[in-house]
Image: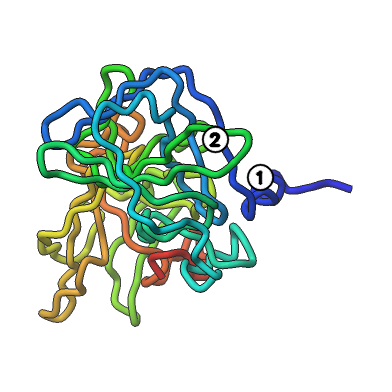
Amino acid sequence: MGERVLDHLMQGLEALRYEPTGKRVRAWLGGVLAVDSTRAVLVWEPRRVVPSYAVPESDVGVEVVATGAVGAADDGGAGVRIPAVSDRSVLDPSIPFAVHTAEGEVVELRADGDTALGLRLRDPDLPGYVALDFSGFDQWRDEDEPLVAHPRDPFHRIDVLASSRHLRVELDGALLAESRHPMLLFETALPPRYYLPRDDVRVDLRPSERRTWCAYKGQASYWSPVVDGHPLGDLAWSYEDPLHEAERVRRLVAFFDERVDVTVDGVRLPRPVTPWS
Protein backbone atom coordinates (compact mmCIF):
# COMPACT_ATOMS: atom_id res chain seq x y z
CA MET A 1 0.00 0.00 0.00
CA GLY A 2 1.31 3.45 -0.90
CA GLU A 3 2.15 6.01 1.75
CA ARG A 4 2.13 9.76 1.39
CA VAL A 5 5.62 11.12 2.00
CA LEU A 6 4.47 13.96 4.29
CA ASP A 7 2.48 11.46 6.39
CA HIS A 8 5.60 9.35 6.67
CA LEU A 9 7.70 12.32 7.79
CA MET A 10 5.10 13.34 10.36
CA GLN A 11 4.94 9.87 11.96
CA GLY A 12 7.82 10.92 14.20
CA LEU A 13 6.17 14.19 15.27
CA GLU A 14 5.57 12.93 18.82
CA ALA A 15 9.24 12.05 19.32
CA LEU A 16 12.36 14.11 20.02
CA ARG A 17 14.04 14.18 16.60
CA TYR A 18 17.57 15.27 15.75
CA GLU A 19 19.89 15.51 12.76
CA PRO A 20 23.65 16.21 12.85
CA THR A 21 25.01 19.02 10.71
CA GLY A 22 28.53 19.49 9.41
CA LYS A 23 28.26 23.28 9.67
CA ARG A 24 30.20 25.52 12.01
CA VAL A 25 27.48 27.19 14.08
CA ARG A 26 28.05 30.40 16.04
CA ALA A 27 25.82 32.64 18.14
CA TRP A 28 26.46 35.97 19.87
CA LEU A 29 24.93 37.16 23.12
CA GLY A 30 25.49 40.59 24.65
CA GLY A 31 28.07 41.25 21.95
CA VAL A 32 30.06 38.16 23.06
CA LEU A 33 30.64 35.02 21.00
CA ALA A 34 28.58 32.69 23.19
CA VAL A 35 28.45 29.55 21.03
CA ASP A 36 31.04 28.21 18.60
CA SER A 37 30.52 24.60 17.57
CA THR A 38 31.28 22.16 14.77
CA ARG A 39 29.28 19.48 16.61
CA ALA A 40 25.83 21.09 16.49
CA VAL A 41 22.70 19.08 15.82
CA LEU A 42 19.29 20.24 14.70
CA VAL A 43 16.67 19.28 17.30
CA TRP A 44 12.90 19.16 16.96
CA GLU A 45 11.12 18.79 20.30
CA PRO A 46 7.99 16.63 20.12
CA ARG A 47 5.27 18.36 18.03
CA ARG A 48 7.67 21.14 16.96
CA VAL A 49 7.69 21.81 13.22
CA VAL A 50 10.85 23.95 13.04
CA PRO A 51 14.18 23.00 14.60
CA SER A 52 16.43 24.51 17.22
CA TYR A 53 20.18 24.16 17.39
CA ALA A 54 21.63 22.04 20.20
CA VAL A 55 25.36 22.01 20.96
CA PRO A 56 27.60 20.27 23.50
CA GLU A 57 27.71 22.42 26.62
CA SER A 58 31.49 22.49 26.31
CA ASP A 59 31.03 24.54 23.10
CA VAL A 60 29.24 27.29 25.05
CA GLY A 61 31.63 30.08 25.97
CA VAL A 62 29.47 31.93 28.52
CA GLU A 63 28.00 31.13 31.92
CA VAL A 64 25.28 28.45 31.94
CA VAL A 65 23.00 28.53 34.99
CA ALA A 66 20.17 26.11 35.83
CA THR A 67 16.86 27.81 36.61
CA GLY A 68 15.30 24.90 38.49
CA ALA A 69 12.60 24.40 35.86
CA VAL A 70 12.21 21.21 33.85
CA GLY A 71 11.13 20.51 30.29
CA ALA A 72 8.24 18.39 29.02
CA ALA A 73 5.70 20.49 30.96
CA ASP A 74 3.27 21.00 28.06
CA ASP A 75 0.29 18.65 28.21
CA GLY A 76 -0.71 19.10 24.59
CA GLY A 77 -2.74 22.27 25.13
CA ALA A 78 -0.28 24.53 23.32
CA GLY A 79 -0.03 24.78 19.57
CA VAL A 80 -2.23 25.17 16.54
CA ARG A 81 -4.16 22.75 14.35
CA ILE A 82 -2.72 22.21 10.87
CA PRO A 83 -4.77 19.33 9.43
CA ALA A 84 -2.49 18.96 6.40
CA VAL A 85 0.40 18.20 8.77
CA SER A 86 -0.99 16.37 11.79
CA ASP A 87 -4.19 15.37 13.58
CA ARG A 88 -2.77 16.90 16.77
CA SER A 89 -1.91 20.49 17.53
CA VAL A 90 1.64 21.33 16.51
CA LEU A 91 4.07 23.87 17.90
CA ASP A 92 4.65 26.30 15.03
CA PRO A 93 7.21 29.16 15.21
CA SER A 94 4.72 31.39 17.05
CA ILE A 95 4.93 29.10 20.12
CA PRO A 96 7.90 30.31 22.19
CA PHE A 97 10.92 28.15 22.99
CA ALA A 98 9.96 28.25 26.69
CA VAL A 99 7.09 25.83 25.93
CA HIS A 100 8.84 22.47 26.12
CA THR A 101 7.77 18.98 25.15
CA ALA A 102 11.19 17.30 25.59
CA GLU A 103 12.65 16.10 28.87
CA GLY A 104 15.42 18.26 30.26
CA GLU A 105 16.57 21.01 32.61
CA VAL A 106 15.94 24.65 31.74
CA VAL A 107 19.07 26.82 31.86
CA GLU A 108 20.05 30.42 31.18
CA LEU A 109 23.10 31.49 29.20
CA ARG A 110 24.44 34.75 30.61
CA ALA A 111 26.79 37.31 29.06
CA ASP A 112 27.29 40.94 30.09
CA GLY A 113 23.82 41.17 31.62
CA ASP A 114 22.03 39.58 28.65
CA THR A 115 20.42 36.16 28.88
CA ALA A 116 19.14 33.47 26.55
CA LEU A 117 17.28 30.28 27.36
CA GLY A 118 18.48 26.75 26.83
CA LEU A 119 17.36 23.21 27.65
CA ARG A 120 19.83 20.59 28.90
CA LEU A 121 18.43 17.64 27.04
CA ARG A 122 17.76 14.45 28.95
CA ASP A 123 18.17 12.00 26.10
CA PRO A 124 20.66 9.12 25.85
CA ASP A 125 21.42 9.94 22.21
CA LEU A 126 22.34 13.55 23.03
CA PRO A 127 24.32 13.42 26.28
CA GLY A 128 25.74 16.79 27.30
CA TYR A 129 23.80 18.71 24.65
CA VAL A 130 21.94 21.96 25.28
CA ALA A 131 19.14 23.09 22.96
CA LEU A 132 19.20 26.86 22.46
CA ASP A 133 16.49 29.51 22.04
CA PHE A 134 17.29 31.05 18.65
CA SER A 135 15.38 34.25 19.41
CA GLY A 136 17.34 34.94 22.59
CA PHE A 137 20.64 35.63 20.84
CA ASP A 138 21.88 38.76 19.06
CA GLN A 139 22.83 36.93 15.87
CA TRP A 140 23.51 33.48 14.45
CA ARG A 141 25.74 32.27 11.65
CA ASP A 142 26.01 29.03 9.71
CA GLU A 143 29.67 29.15 8.72
CA ASP A 144 29.89 32.86 7.76
CA GLU A 145 26.29 33.20 6.55
CA PRO A 146 23.76 34.98 8.80
CA LEU A 147 20.60 33.13 9.85
CA VAL A 148 17.16 34.65 10.42
CA ALA A 149 14.01 33.39 12.18
CA HIS A 150 15.28 29.90 13.06
CA PRO A 151 17.82 27.31 11.88
CA ARG A 152 17.24 26.08 8.35
CA ASP A 153 15.65 22.64 8.08
CA PRO A 154 17.48 20.39 5.57
CA PHE A 155 14.19 18.61 4.86
CA HIS A 156 12.35 21.85 4.07
CA ARG A 157 12.54 23.63 0.72
CA ILE A 158 10.88 26.21 -1.47
CA ASP A 159 10.30 26.17 -5.23
CA VAL A 160 9.29 29.29 -7.17
CA LEU A 161 7.76 28.62 -10.60
CA ALA A 162 6.45 30.96 -13.28
CA SER A 163 2.86 30.15 -14.28
CA SER A 164 0.28 31.13 -16.88
CA ARG A 165 -2.72 30.18 -14.73
CA HIS A 166 -5.60 32.65 -14.55
CA LEU A 167 -5.81 33.83 -10.96
CA ARG A 168 -8.49 35.94 -9.28
CA VAL A 169 -8.36 37.11 -5.68
CA GLU A 170 -11.63 38.36 -4.16
CA LEU A 171 -13.12 39.17 -0.80
CA ASP A 172 -16.88 39.41 -0.27
CA GLY A 173 -17.30 39.83 -4.02
CA ALA A 174 -14.76 42.65 -4.34
CA LEU A 175 -11.94 41.96 -6.81
CA LEU A 176 -8.56 42.50 -5.15
CA ALA A 177 -6.26 41.16 -7.88
CA GLU A 178 -6.31 39.33 -11.19
CA SER A 179 -3.34 37.88 -13.07
CA ARG A 180 -2.43 35.55 -15.90
CA HIS A 181 1.25 35.39 -15.01
CA PRO A 182 1.63 34.74 -11.28
CA MET A 183 4.67 33.22 -9.64
CA LEU A 184 3.77 30.14 -7.60
CA LEU A 185 5.80 29.47 -4.47
CA PHE A 186 5.68 25.90 -3.16
CA GLU A 187 6.96 25.32 0.36
CA THR A 188 7.14 22.08 2.32
CA ALA A 189 3.97 21.40 4.37
CA LEU A 190 2.36 24.72 3.39
CA PRO A 191 -0.26 25.53 0.73
CA PRO A 192 0.94 27.01 -2.58
CA ARG A 193 1.31 30.79 -2.46
CA TYR A 194 0.46 32.98 -5.43
CA TYR A 195 2.73 36.01 -5.91
CA LEU A 196 1.43 38.65 -8.29
CA PRO A 197 2.94 41.64 -10.11
CA ARG A 198 1.81 44.87 -8.48
CA ASP A 199 0.22 45.98 -11.74
CA ASP A 200 -2.17 43.04 -11.35
CA VAL A 201 -3.43 44.24 -7.96
CA ARG A 202 -6.72 46.06 -8.57
CA VAL A 203 -6.90 47.98 -5.28
CA ASP A 204 -4.60 50.38 -3.48
CA LEU A 205 -2.14 48.83 -1.04
CA ARG A 206 -1.45 50.73 2.17
CA PRO A 207 1.93 49.88 3.76
CA SER A 208 1.99 48.44 7.27
CA GLU A 209 4.68 48.74 9.92
CA ARG A 210 4.50 44.98 10.54
CA ARG A 211 7.56 42.89 9.63
CA THR A 212 8.21 39.17 10.02
CA TRP A 213 11.13 36.92 9.12
CA CYS A 214 11.27 33.64 7.24
CA ALA A 215 14.41 31.49 7.36
CA TYR A 216 14.05 30.70 3.65
CA LYS A 217 12.64 33.91 2.16
CA GLY A 218 13.83 36.76 4.38
CA GLN A 219 11.97 39.77 5.79
CA ALA A 220 8.31 40.16 4.84
CA SER A 221 6.64 43.57 4.55
CA TYR A 222 2.87 43.74 4.99
CA TRP A 223 0.18 45.62 3.09
CA SER A 224 -3.45 46.48 3.72
CA PRO A 225 -5.64 46.45 0.57
CA VAL A 226 -8.07 49.38 0.56
CA VAL A 227 -11.64 48.43 -0.43
CA ASP A 228 -14.38 51.10 -0.44
CA GLY A 229 -12.11 53.36 1.56
CA HIS A 230 -11.45 50.75 4.25
CA PRO A 231 -8.00 49.17 4.72
CA LEU A 232 -8.09 45.40 5.23
CA GLY A 233 -5.33 45.02 7.79
CA ASP A 234 -2.19 43.14 6.75
CA LEU A 235 -4.02 40.95 4.25
CA ALA A 236 -1.07 40.86 1.83
CA TRP A 237 2.70 40.74 2.01
CA SER A 238 5.81 41.01 -0.12
CA TYR A 239 9.54 40.39 0.08
CA GLU A 240 11.22 43.63 -0.89
CA ASP A 241 14.74 42.25 -0.51
CA PRO A 242 14.42 38.45 -0.37
CA LEU A 243 17.01 35.81 0.33
CA HIS A 244 18.49 34.23 -2.78
CA GLU A 245 16.10 31.23 -2.82
CA ALA A 246 13.13 33.60 -3.09
CA GLU A 247 14.66 36.09 -5.52
CA ARG A 248 11.98 35.40 -8.15
CA VAL A 249 9.24 36.82 -5.89
CA ARG A 250 11.07 40.10 -5.20
CA ARG A 251 8.49 42.91 -4.74
CA LEU A 252 5.61 40.66 -5.88
CA VAL A 253 2.47 40.62 -3.73
CA ALA A 254 0.82 37.60 -2.10
CA PHE A 255 -2.50 37.46 -0.27
CA PHE A 256 -3.40 35.25 2.66
CA ASP A 257 -5.39 32.48 0.94
CA GLU A 258 -6.75 31.66 4.39
CA ARG A 259 -8.68 34.98 4.45
CA VAL A 260 -9.60 35.66 0.82
CA ASP A 261 -11.28 33.78 -2.03
CA VAL A 262 -8.86 32.51 -4.66
CA THR A 263 -10.04 31.23 -8.04
CA VAL A 264 -7.56 29.47 -10.33
CA ASP A 265 -8.58 28.75 -13.94
CA GLY A 266 -12.22 29.17 -12.99
CA VAL A 267 -12.11 26.87 -9.95
CA ARG A 268 -12.67 28.37 -6.49
CA LEU A 269 -10.12 26.96 -4.06
CA PRO A 270 -11.02 26.04 -0.48
CA ARG A 271 -9.43 28.27 2.13
CA PRO A 272 -6.50 26.36 3.68
CA VAL A 273 -6.19 25.89 7.43
CA THR A 274 -2.81 27.10 8.71
CA PRO A 275 -1.46 29.11 11.67
CA TRP A 276 -2.49 32.23 9.70
CA SER A 277 -6.16 31.25 9.30
Q: Residue at x 35, y 63 (%)?
A: 256
Q: Which mark is residue 86?
A: none
Residue at horizontal 26%, vertical 26%? 61
Q: Element type at marker 2?
A: loop
Residue at x 11%, y 31% (from the top left corner): 31
The one of 198 and 71 positioned closer to us in this rendering: 71
Q: Nearer the viewer, residue 178 or 247?
A: 247
Which residue in the structure is indicated by mark 1? 9
The answer, for residue 162, to whether it is visible in the render is no
Describe residue 60's horizontal placement relative to residue 6 as left or right.
left
In the image shown, does 230 or 87 lie closer to the viewer?
87
Disc 2 designates what residue? 155
Residue depicted at 45% across the width and 57% down the height: 70
Give above or below for 147 relative to 220: above
CB within 8 Å, label 1 to label 2 = yes
The C terminus - image quarter: bottom left
- Quarter of the figure with residue 231: bottom left
